Image (cartoon, rainbow, N blue to C red):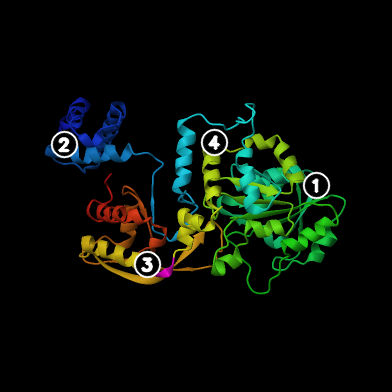
């Protein structure tokens, strides 16, 4: 019987002839389609061996083609794809961090589709420096004397320490020796930079005298690190950057501060109190400051280094800098993003990260209600759809204890609807995939992190997951 079934499997050429008439496969290379047809038929053979196929009619082209078409479309999709973020985490490190402003997107397009003055001085006609394209803007916005940009903040910290402290001791509070996402640990980065770690204070309390007692002939710098997604509460004390700057000034030592998610906008309320601005940190006299471009700043992935000119010039001259430099697309997007900050109100309106963080509770309530109506109209028989108060998160290691008030859309299965875990998995297979959060026996969707034009895509993704098991392109 199995032998007869194997003989009934249609040939690759026969299936390809049918597929040539399918407009949904337009644009997929024929060689890839042929490769996927062979892979699909191998799965059919395995199904026959398992006894999952028992009738030769199941192997006729008309029976196989719908599933085969979906198989090809699904496996020919790009691996890097757009995702609908309904988690409420604004700077979601797993979902691409900050979204770029439209101005930054257009700037990247310009950089990609034509030649540019990446390293060409248009005034002299001679070779120029790519760093000059954003240095003046960074200095104007922050108040720093000089600036440099590399490919991410981990690289920035590595480069700064390697330049200013290789072979010497760097004094840092024990409570700031943290690990953040991707197993990025401050002590390990210091080790790779060639600097020697000198811990001071206790985990929960460090005093100025701790730094003063630790300074000796081998001391190369004092370091202050943002604790990112880790906070100590209760009986706690840390040394302010201005106090460190005063200690270091008397001894002609640099103070390095890793701000993590550095921001140029003074956020309202509790977030503004928890996250220092870059401007404030510069004003405290810190020698060198490092922070990310793709977190609270709302720009592309980059590590921004700024501070006193005598230190920045040494860092820029480090040969390691060339290995860590940013490309033309990042520079274009970063410059465009920084230009928006020249008008803080425009920045808050046009930079998606800032707009999402600062969204009012009333606007989120209205958006949740509108989204719930659309879902109810389409899937009301499958789910109980309701809105409820909830919380969002800033993400990206910023203000981990701060809850932003929001309004959620809650989907509670009923009848023959898929259970929540099945629904969650199926939503990851839709096009585009939809990522929400399951809590309190409901699928929760937060409008804060959804663009206004994505409501239609969200409803379509839910339909795909419920009716097609997510197998749709």
According to the image, label 1 marks what residue? 168
Q: Residue at x 18, y 35 (%)?
A: 2
Assess disc 1: are there few (<14), some (14-19) or many (≥20) residues with their C-alpha within 10 Å of its C-alpha.
some
The answer to if 127 sits in the magenta stretch is no
Quadrant in the rendering for residue 257: bottom right
Which of the two marks, 2 or 4, is nearer to us in this view? 4
Query: Distance from label 3 to label 2 (Cα)?
Result: 46 Å
Q: Which mark is residue 328?
A: 4
Q: Secondary structure at mark 4?
A: helix
Which of the two marks, 2 or 1, is nearer to us in this view? 1
User: Left or right: 332 with respect to 153?
Assistant: left
Q: Mark 1 or mark 4: which comes first in sequence?
A: 1
According to the image, label 3 marks what residue? 408
According to the image, label 2 marks what residue? 59
Query: Distance from label 3 to label 1 (Cα)?
Result: 52 Å
Q: Nearer the viewer, residue 335 or 298?
A: 335
Q: Which residues are magenta?
A: 360-364
């Amino acid at each position: 019987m199995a032998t007869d079934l194997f003989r009934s499997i249609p040939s690759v050429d026969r299936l390809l002839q049918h597929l040539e008439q399918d407009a949904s496969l337009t644009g997929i290379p024929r060689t890839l389609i042929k490769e996927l047809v062979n892979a699909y038929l191998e799965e059919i053979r395995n199904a026959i061996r398992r006894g999952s196929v028992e009738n030769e009619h199941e192997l006729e082209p008309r029976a196989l083609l719908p599933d085969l078409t979906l198989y090809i479309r699904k496996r020919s999709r790009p691996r890097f794809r757009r995702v609908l973020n309904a988690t409420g985490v604004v700077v979601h490190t797993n979902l691409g961090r900050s979204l770029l402003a439209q101005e930054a997107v257009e700037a990247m397009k310009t950089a990609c589709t034509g030649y540019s003055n990446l390293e060409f001085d248009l005034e002299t006609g001679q070779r120029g420096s790519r760093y000059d394209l954003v240095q003046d803007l960074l200095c104007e916005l922050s108040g720093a004397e000089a600036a440099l940009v590399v490919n991410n903040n981990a690289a920035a910290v590595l480069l700064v320490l390697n330049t200013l402290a290789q072979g010497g001791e760097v004094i840092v509070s024990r409570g700031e020796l943290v690990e953040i996402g991707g197993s990025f640990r401050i002590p390990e980065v210091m080790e790779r930079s060639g600097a020697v770690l000198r811990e001071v204070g206790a985990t929960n309390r460090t005093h100025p005298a701790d730094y003063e007692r630790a300074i000796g002939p081998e001391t190369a710098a004092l370091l202050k690190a943002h604790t990112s997604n880790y906070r100590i509460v209760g009986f706690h004390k840390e040394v302010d950057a201005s106090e460190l700057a005063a200690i270091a000034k008397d001894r002609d030592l640099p103070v390095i501060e890793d701000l993590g998610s550095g921001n140029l906008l003074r956020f309202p309320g509790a977030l503004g109190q928890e996250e220092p601005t870059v401007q404030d940190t510069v004003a405290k006299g810190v020698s060198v400051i490092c922070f990310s471009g793709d977190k609270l700043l709302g720009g592309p992935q980059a590590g921004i280094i700024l501070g006193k000119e005598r230190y920045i010039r040494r860092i820029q001259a480090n040969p390691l800098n060339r290995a860590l430099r940013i490309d033309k697309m990042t520079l274009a997007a970063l410059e465009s993003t920084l230009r928006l900050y020249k008008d803080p109100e425009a920045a808050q309106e046009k930079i998606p990260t800032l707009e999402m963080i600062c969204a009012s509770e009333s606007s989120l309530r209205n958006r949740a209600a509108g989204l719930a109506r659309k879902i109810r109209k389409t899937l009301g028989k499958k789910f109980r759809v309701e809105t409820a108060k909830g919380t969002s998160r800033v993400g990206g290691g910023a203000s981990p204890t701060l809850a932003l008030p929001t309004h959620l859309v809650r989907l509670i299965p009923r009848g023959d609807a898929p259970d929540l875990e099945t629904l969650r998995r199926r939503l990851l297979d839709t096009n585009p995939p939809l990522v929400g959060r399951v809590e309190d026996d409901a699928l929760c969707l937060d409008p804060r992190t959804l663009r206004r034009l994505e409501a239609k895509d969200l409803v379509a993704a839910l339909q795909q997951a419920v009716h097609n098991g997510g197998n749709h392109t």
